[in-house]
Amino acid sequence: MKLYSILIPMFLLLSTIFTACSSATNTVDQSKAAPEAIVSEESSTEPASNEDASEESTTEAVSANTESAQADEYFTERDLDASYEADTHITLSDGASTADGAGVQIDGDTILISKEGTYVLSGTLSNGQIIIDTTETAKIQLVLDNASVTCENSAALYIKSADKVFLTLAAGTGNTLSSTGTFTDDKIDAAIYAKEDLTINGDGTLTLTCETGHGIAAKDDLKITAGSLSITAAGKGLDVNDSVRIAAGTLDITSGKDAIQIENTDDASQGWFYMSGGTVNLSAEAGDGIDASGQVTILDGALSILSGGGYENSTQKNNGSTDDETSLKGIKSDVGILIQNGTFRINTADDALHTDGDLTLENGAFMIAAGDDALHAEQALTIQDGEIEILSCHEGLEGYKITIAGGNTTLNADDDGVNAAGSGSPTLTISGGTLYVDASGDGLDSNGSMYITGGVVIVDGPVNEGNAALDYDGQAVITGGQLIAVGPSGMALNLSAAEGQGSILYNVGLVSAGTTITLTDSSGKEILSYTPQKDFSSLVLSDPAIQVGSTYTLTIGQTSVEIEMTEALYGQGGMMGGMGGMQGPKVR
C-alpha cells in the first residue's frame, strides 16, 4: 500500500473544502506537505469504527457522551417553525410610529410590547428602542420585516420580561439593529439584550452592530435555527449565560473580545455550546472564537475561526511564552469538547482546540494553524476518525491520555509533534489510522508510556541532537501497524518491546533530506520505502513483515547493509546514542 495514495487525496480534499470557506481566517502557510512513502500491504489497517456513545443527554445539558443527538432534542417545534400570523403590525418612523393592534405602547421613539402575541415590525427608527416587558408566562413572536432600529446609549432590542421570545426574520428581508455610543445603564450592554430565552429563526437577514458593547447578551438560552446573522461588536459577539444552540443558518461575527462566550458561574450544568448544522464564521480580535464554561458539542456544520490575528501573532513564536491575561484560542471548554462531524478551518494565536476535560474527534475535516497547541486536552484526547491537517503549531497533539484510533492526521510542529504529558502515568496509544508528524522537537513524546497496536505512523523528527524522533519515560511497545521514524542519533531510542513483529534502530552518519530509505526481505520483496524530508542520522523501522529469524536489506541512498533479526529488537539507543547494530557510511 502506498501511503501517498492516502495523504495526497486528503490534501486535495481539504484544499477544496476550505477554499470555499469564509475568508475570515488569515492565509496560512501550506508549503509544508507530507512526503510520499510506500508501505507494505501487511501493515494496511482500517480506521477503527466509532463506538456507540451513551444516551445521557437532555434538553437542558449536553453530555460528552451524546449519541448523534437530533436537533429536535434541543429545539422545540416552534423554535424551528418561522411561520406566523400577525396580531399587530408596527410601522416604525421617527416620531411617528404606529401600531394597528393591542399590546403596544408608543412613547416617542420607544416601542413597548406588553402582551403575548405576534408582532410584525417594519420601517426605521434612527434613535429608538424596542422593549418587550410582559408576564413571565407570555411568549412573544417578533417578526422583523425590513426593520431598522438604531439606539444611542442602550440596546436596540431590550427583552426585559417574558417566558420566551422568537425573533423571526421574514423571508427575503434585510433588517438592522444597532447600538451606538456608551451604554448609560451598565447592566444593558448589547445591541440585543435579553433577560429571557431567545430564539432567532426565519429566512431573512439581520445585521447587528454595537460600538462599545456586545452583539447579543442573553441571560438564559440563545437558539439560532435559521436565517443569516452578521454581528460586529466592540465587545463579544454573543455573551450568553446558559447555552448557545445552532441548528442551521449562517452566523458571521467580528468581535473585539470573544466571538462567542457562554459562561454560567452559578450553575455548573449550564454554559454549554451545541451545534448540529449551519455555517459559523468567527473573527475575534482579542479573545477566543468559542469560550464555554460547560460542554462544547458539535454534531455537524461548517465552522471558521480566526482569533488573535492568527498563528503568526503567537506569543509562543514571538517570545516563547503565552499571555495569561488574554486567551486567544479557537474553541475552549472548561468541561469537554465532542466533535462528531463537520468542516473546520481554525487559525489562532493560541491553542486551536483546548479543554480542561476530554477532547474527542469522532469525524470531520480540519485545517488548523495554531500559535500554541493544535489540539490540547488536560485529560483524554481521542481521535477516532476524520481528516486532520495541522499546517503550523507549537505542539501538535497534547493530552494526558492520547488515543489515535483512525483517520488521517498530518501535522507540522515547532516543538513536539505528539506529547502525552501530565503528572501520573500519561499514555500515547495508536491503534489505527494514518499519522504523519514533522516535528522540530520530539516527534512522538510520552512522559509515561506509548503503545502502537495498528495504523501507519511516520515521523520526520528534529535535526537537533537535543531531541529525538521517539521519546518516552516508561515503555514503548509495538504489537501491530507500521512505524517509520527518522531523526538525530544523539538521543535516539528504539522501542522497548515488540510483539509479533520486529523493530529496527539503525544509526548512520548524517544523511541528506531527500535520500530514500528502502527495506526489502531476503527474496528482494520491498517491505517499505520512504524519503525523509529532513537531514537525519538515525531511523526506527517496524512492520509486521519484519520477523525474528529473517534477514533484511536496508538501503539508504546508494548504500545497503544486511540486518539479521536474531531478536525482536535490533539496535538499542539511549542518551548516548546507539550504533543501531551496524554503523553505516556517511551518505550525502
Image (cartoon, rainbow, N blue to C red):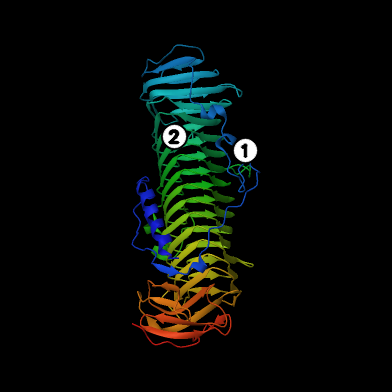
Q: Which residue is mark 2?
A: 183
Residue 139: image location, x then y, percent: 56, 23
Asked whether residue 380 appears in the rendered view, the answer is yes
Up/down of 201 relative to 278, above or below: above
Which mark is first along the chain, 1 or 2?
A: 1
Q: Choose between 153 and 547: the one closer to the eye.
A: 547
Position of the N terminus, as image quadrant, is bottom left
Up/down of 250 relative to 489, above or below: above
Mark 2 vs mark 1: give the one in front: 1
Label 1 Cα neighbours within 10 Å, binned few <14 / some 14-19 / many ≥20: few
For image coordinates 55% across by 36% down, the residue present is 71
Secondary structure under badge 2? loop
Type of amino acid at the residue the image marks with label 1: Glu
Residue 182: image location, x then y, percent: 41, 35
Residue 211: image location, x then y, percent: 38, 37
Q: Which mark is residue 275?
A: none
Q: Which residue is mark 1?
A: 60
Q: Choose between 231 and 455: the one closer to the eye.
A: 455
Up/down of 403 relative to 203, above or below: below
Q: CA distance from mark 2 to mark 1?
A: 32 Å
Label 2 Cα neighbours within 10 Å, binned few <14 / some 14-19 / many ≥20: some
Residue 567: image location, x then y, percent: 58, 83
For image coordinates 57% across by 54% down, the residue present is 49
For image coordinates 47% across by 19% down, the residue present is 119
Secondary structure under badge 1? loop
